[in-house]
């Protein structure tokens, strides 16, 4: 075996051994509570490290030339009439109106009896990434604020002629608004004590839609949608991993992953992707004993010493935790980039960081699948009941109000196998993307492989982190 392959095996093996310091029994968190893992945790951790080692060795020996960088060859699956996009937009606007109305007029004291929290936190926030991976950028067509802005622009152009040109979108602003939006939504979901109040969610939804419409009116619909709209930007990143690509009036089929390779990295992109991973990581971490019985009480006491009330102290403590998770993920990625700097001084730190940030997108999606797969399956069933009684008023519009969630639809083993498979597949895809990009940047294949020792370390660290977070919940 070549020397660089041996080094890769040894390095990843040492990193995988970190899992041995964690207690053997493992548990998963979810709506059904604590679940025993069918095999000892150390075996799963070693299996994760082993798969990544095999992936790296296979890439180093069987992937000698770039395969993803060339413009992808696509095949048209089918053409659709132009009226389909406006129709999807109308559906998106209708759903938005129903969700807002339910939040304002429906049951306020039992969030599980109101459609709004379930729709926003599960069907929308968790469900759309799954749809994006399977069918491409579907949210672009259904986005209610984009559809409303396009309709207003169309009507205005018919009545007043050519509209004034929007201002140029500032280059320096990049995707920073989207990064802030993702952190803001994560704060709402994970930190805010009244996050389940339907009326609060309704007002925030209206406020976000208003902000998006103002931004589109100033800088243009498409520039704002592709740069500043947090949800459109995140879901578009996930859709770039999909084999389906919606382009003009047709649906194309392309190789998986190639869509993310040509991601335009503008200011704020790195912060955005790290925020996507960091927010999901904190969601897992805050349910574990290290947070619940250690860091959180200490931080609460610290803020309480300044005269802050209990709720505000809890929110401040969780805010610190969320920002720390974002910072930790950013630092871990920075560690891999600084390691790669030692291979070839032709590339600056910032240049390497921009060149490889797309490799973290599969990891961000893997974390979502691993953490929320079971919750989505259960809450989709709950949404069937809420569709007939969205206000919690006792109505039964479609005859499904009495449908109950079947928590036995997923066996504990099934949940864990999906979670582990998602983590391993996501990180293997990240390695593939990183190796392919390294082959493009470095003159010699040996240098490209050596540069990926550091990315391999980062990927193994993310895998172990994901496993630990899934096992840390009380």
Image: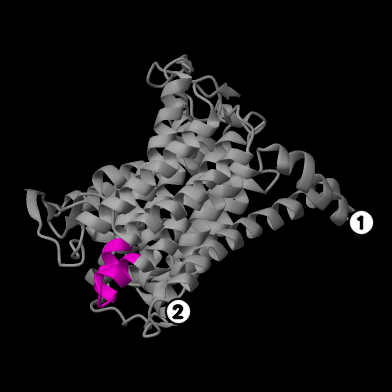
Circle count: 2
* Residue extending farthest bottom: 346
Q: Which mark is residue 307?
A: 1
Task: Find out whether residue 443 is within the magenta segment.
Answer: yes
Across and down, in percent, residue 341 comes to 44, 77
Q: Look at the image and tell me in which quarter the N terminus lies.
A: bottom left
Q: Which residue position is annotated with label 2? A: 350
Residue stretch rendered in magenta on the structure: 434-449
Is 289 in front, or is 184? 289
Q: Crowding near pointer 1: few (<14 within 10 Å), some, many (20+)?
A: few
Name the residue: 43% across, 35% down: 420
Across and down, in percent, residue 279 comes to 56, 52
Please indicate whether residue 315 sits to the left or right of residue 352 in the image.
Answer: right
Give the alpha-carbon distance from disc 2 to disc 1, as whole Å. 42 Å
Q: In this view, does 37 lie above or below 244?
A: above
Nearer the observer: mark 2 or 1; the answer is 2
Q: Look at the image and tell me in which quarter the C terminus lies.
A: top right
Name the residue: 21% across, 58% down: 63
Name the residue: 39% across, 49% down: 427
Q: Choose the circle earlier in sequence order: 2 or 1.
A: 1
Please say whether residue 122 is visible from this viewpoint. Answer: no
Please say whether residue 349 is visible from this viewpoint. Answer: yes
Q: Crowding near pointer 2: few (<14 within 10 Å), some, many (20+)?
A: few
Is 166 in front, or is 469? 469
């Amino acid at each position: 075996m070549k020397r660089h392959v041996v080094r890769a095996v040894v390095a990843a093996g040492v990193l995988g051994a970190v899992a041995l310091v964690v207690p053997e029994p493992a548990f998963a968190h979810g709506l059904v509570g604590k679940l025993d893992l069918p095999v000892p945790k150390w075996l799963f951790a070693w299996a994760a490290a082993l798969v990544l080692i095999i992936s790296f060795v296979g890439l180093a020996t069987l992937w000698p030339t770039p395969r993803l960088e060339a413009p992808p060859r696509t095949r048209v699956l089918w053409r659709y009439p132009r009226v389909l996009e406006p129709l999807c937009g109308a559906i998106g606007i209708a759903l938005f109106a129903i969700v807002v109305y339910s939040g304002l007029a429906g049951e306020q004291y039992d969030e599980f009896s109101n459609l709004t929290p379930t729709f926003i936190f599960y069907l929308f926030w968790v469900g759309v990434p799954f749809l994006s991976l399977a069918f491409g950028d579907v949210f672009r067509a259904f986005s209610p604020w984009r559809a409303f802005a396009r309709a207003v622009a169309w009507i205005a152009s018919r009545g007043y002629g050519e509209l004034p040109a929007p201002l140029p979108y500032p280059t320096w602003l990049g995707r920073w608004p989207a990064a802030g939006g993702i952190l803001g939504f994560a704060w709402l979901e994970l930190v805010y004590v009244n996050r389940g109040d339907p009326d609060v969610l309704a007002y925030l939804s209206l406020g976000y839609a208003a902000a998006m419409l103002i931004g589109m009116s100033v800088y243009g619909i498409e520039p704002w949608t592709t740069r500043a709209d947090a949800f459109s930007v995140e879901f578009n990143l996930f859709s770039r991993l999909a084999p389906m690509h919606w382009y003009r009036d047709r649906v194309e089929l392309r190789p998986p992953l190639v869509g993310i390779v040509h991601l335009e990295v503008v200011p704020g992109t790195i912060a955005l992707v790290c925020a996507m991973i960091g927010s999901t990581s904190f969601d897992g971490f805050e349910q574990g004993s290290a947070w619940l019985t250690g860091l959180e009480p200490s931080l609460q006491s610290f803020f309480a010493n300044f005269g802050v009330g209990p709720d505000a102290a809890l929110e401040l403590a969780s805010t610190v935790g969320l920002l720390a998770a974002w910072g930790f993920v950013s630092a871990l990625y920075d560690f891999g980039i600084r390691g790669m700097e030692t291979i070839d001084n032709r590339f600056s730190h910032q240049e390497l960081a921009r060149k490889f940030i797309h490799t973290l997108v599969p990891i961000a999606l893997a974390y979502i699948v691993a953490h929320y797969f079971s919750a989505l399956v259960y809450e989709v069933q709950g949404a069937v009941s809420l569709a007939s009684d969205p206000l919690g008023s006792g109505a039964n519009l479609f005859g499904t109000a009495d449908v109950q969630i079947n928590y036995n639809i997923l066996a504990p083993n099934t949940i864990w196998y999906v979670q582990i498979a998602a983590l391993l597949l996501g990180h293997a895809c990240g390695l593939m993307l990183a190796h392919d990009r390294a082959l493009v940047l470095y003159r010699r294949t040996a240098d490209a492989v050596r540069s990926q020792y550091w990315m391999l370390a980062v990927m193994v660290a993310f895998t172990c982190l994901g496993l630990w977070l899934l096992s840390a919940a009380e």
